[in-house]
Structure formats: structure tokens, C-alpha cells
Image (cartoon, rainbow, N blue to C red):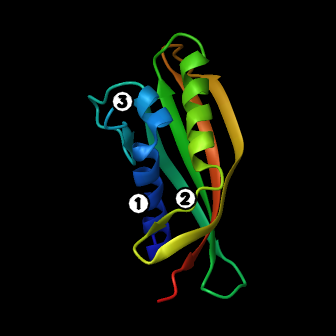
Amino acid sequence: MSAHELALQKALIAHLKADAGVQALLGEPARIRDSAPADTAFPHLLIGRCESRPVAADGGGLEQALTLTVVSRFRGTEEAKAILAAVRVALNDAALEADGVRTVSLRVPFADVFPAADGARTFAVLRVRAVTEEVET
């Protein structure tokens, strides 16, 4: 991962953990991780795949696509959909900054909610698209 990917992940996690709507559904502190320990509580949000490519623009821009996955044990899709909605609202056009990198654009263009094959969990997958650039000093 480059500095842009690490900075975006750091800023995104901090922003979501500070959001009251996300905290109400994922606990305080919000259960947001880039990997789930075996004994993790439910529901939780996992930061997954990150794709990136350079943007032909000033500021050393990078377009990134992050995959976030909500994992719920609530029977049905209600809890996963509520968390998905809270995350979408928290991230829509949010201005994030960390470690000398800031977002120029941030949106959630895709979401999907579905039950796990075992029927014991429900997943909500969100794709976050961000364009980042270095902060000029």
C-alpha cells in the first residue's frame, strides 16, 4: 500500500468511529477493523480490498476503490441495511485528511446486502470511491 492508501484508510476509520450514527449501530468505540479477530463482537465493519490508480491531475492524485463489509448476526437484513445507511450518510462527500493526504472526492457508488450461505450472518458490501491528493504545504 502506498501513502495514499494508508492515509485514506486511517482517515476513513477515524471518521466513521467518530460518527454518532455509526457508533449507535457498531458500538462505542465502533467495531471497525481491517481484519476480524476470531472472538470479535457483532455487528462489525471490515475494511477490505483496496484498488488504486493514478489520476492525471495536479497534486499527485490517486483514485481509490475500497470495499467495506458489514457483518451482522441479526436474523434478516434490517441491521445490515441500517449500518450500510449510516456508513453511506457518514461518508457521502466527507472531507477526510490524514498524514498529508486529503480526499478531493468521496462517494459510495455501490452497495449490496445478502445472507451468508450458512444463514447465520448477513453481509452488506459497500464500494467506496475516493480521489485523494497530497496536501500542499
Could you say where residue 24 lies in the image, as x and y percent from the top left?
43, 28
Residue at mark 2 to residue at mark 3: CA–CA distance: 25 Å
Going by the numbered disc 3, the residue's amino acid type is Gly
Give the residue at the far top of this rendering: 75
Residue depicted at x 59% and y 56%: 94
* Rendered view: 81 above or below 133: above
Q: What residue would you read off at disc 3?
A: 27
**Going 29% across and 37% down the picture, which residue do you hit?**
37
Q: Name the mark nearer the viewer: 1 or 2.
A: 1
Instruction: Give the secondary structure at mark 3.
Output: loop
Instruction: Please state the horizontal and vertical placement of residue 14, each as a whole percent of the image.
Output: 40, 53
Left or right of 122? Residue 38 is left
Distance between mark 1 and mark 2 Cα atoms:
13 Å
Q: Amino acid at mark 2?
A: Cys
Query: Label 2's element?
Result: strand
Residue 120: horizontal and vertical position, in percent? 48, 14
Q: Rate crowding at label 2 as few (under 14), some (14 to 19) or many (20 or more) other CA atoms within 10 Å.
A: some
Above or below for 73 versus 41: above
Q: In the image, what residue occupies the spot 53% across and 38% down?
A: 69
Residue at 26%, 28% in the rendered image: 39
Determine the image quadrant of residue 122: top right
**Can you tell which mark lies on residue 50?**
2
Please name the amino acid that badge 1 sits on.
Answer: Lys
Disc 1: which residue: 10
Viewer-proximal residue, 64 or 118?
Answer: 64
Q: Is residue 51 left or right of residue 121?
A: right
